[in-house]
Image (cartoon, helix red, strand yellow):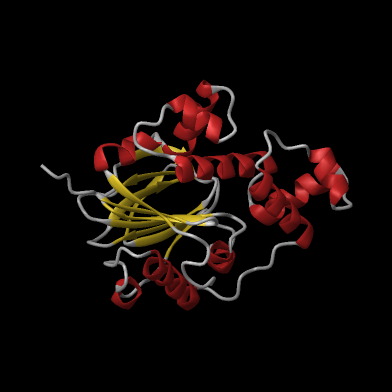
Amino acid sequence: MQHTPNGTLFLWPDHWQVVGHLMPNRPHRHISASWLVGLDGPFRLQVGGQWRSTSAALVAPDAVQALEPGGGRMWCAQLDPDSHFWRALQPLLNGRQTVDIALSAHHLSSLESDTCQLVRQSLSTAIERLGGSPVPVDPRVRTICDYLRTELPEKVDVSWLAESVGLSSSRLSHLFRQEIGVPMRRFLLHLKMNRVLAHWEPGKSMSGLAMDAGFYDQPHFVRTVRDMFDALPSEYVSNGGFRVCRCGPSSSPSP
């Protein structure tokens, strides 16, 4: 018998989106910002230990959160903290860890599609109506983000990175946290987890995933994944649980 997927996972270089039925999860910390929308009705969200019922919400990077989706479908996006998407939405939080947002049916009209272009356009259109212009990233921090994303080094060499952009180590560490919302080491972990999703295939071993992501200690890899997602990739996409679409940067225009 053919298995019907619970939904689709769409992967881009600067964010990923899930449309479908999600599993409940315990408190965990995404290094990315969370965009959470109930497509069939409200869901329950916990942030900072406080539960609430909402139909759509934003959660800041690195905030502790948990989700009870109920029986309805969800539209979830995890936005890199340096992405144009998140930088346009960030002012809505006004320093808070989470905020509810209002979306109309018009914002959700393209989500029945299974194409990268239309799903990305749905997010782009909703953000354009909710947010403003993206808050620019300090060019020195942007240089560091681009380097870490491109090179994916084994570890963060703060002294070398600071020298490369003409700052002291302490000044760069402070500026990066101020601009991005997480320390450089946490940001690199996020990029490594994105590499896991990009390279995951059915039947791939945990040790293989760890190596692909630049982890040489499998237990550390497993702890990191649990801390960030409360689930291993196999728990979502094994046995056809979710269809995976790897979307290139040119699959639709940037926001």
Q: Residue at x 22, y 61 (%)?
A: 40
Q: Is residue 112 above or below residue 176?
A: below
* Quarter of the figure with residue 28: top left
Is 93 left, or right, of 113 in this rendering? right
Residue 252 rendering spot, x and y as whole percentages: 47, 70
Residue nearer the viewer, 152 or 172: 152
Vertical placement of residue 123 versus 176, above or below: below
Q: Quadrant of the N terminus?
A: top left
Instruction: Report the side of 235 relative to 213 (left or right).
Output: left
Instruction: Please say if 36 is above or below 161.
Output: below
Residue 194 in sight from this viewpoint = yes
Measured as percent of width and height from the top left, residue 251 is found at 46, 67
User: Residue 63 location in percent, x, y?
Assistant: 52, 46
Number of numbered discs visible in the structure rendering: 0
Q: Relative to 109, is 165 above or below?
A: above
What residue is at 47 percent from the left and 46 percent from the top?
198
Q: Is residue 65 left or right of residue 211?
A: left
Query: In the drawing, does residue 145 fall left or right of residue 127?
Result: right
Residue at 72%, 37% in the rendered image: 156
Residue 222 visible in the current orientation: no
Q: Which of the two residues, 55 or 195, is positioned nearer the viewer here?
A: 195
- The residue shown at (32%, 78%) is 106
Tell which of 126 and 111 is nearer to you: 111
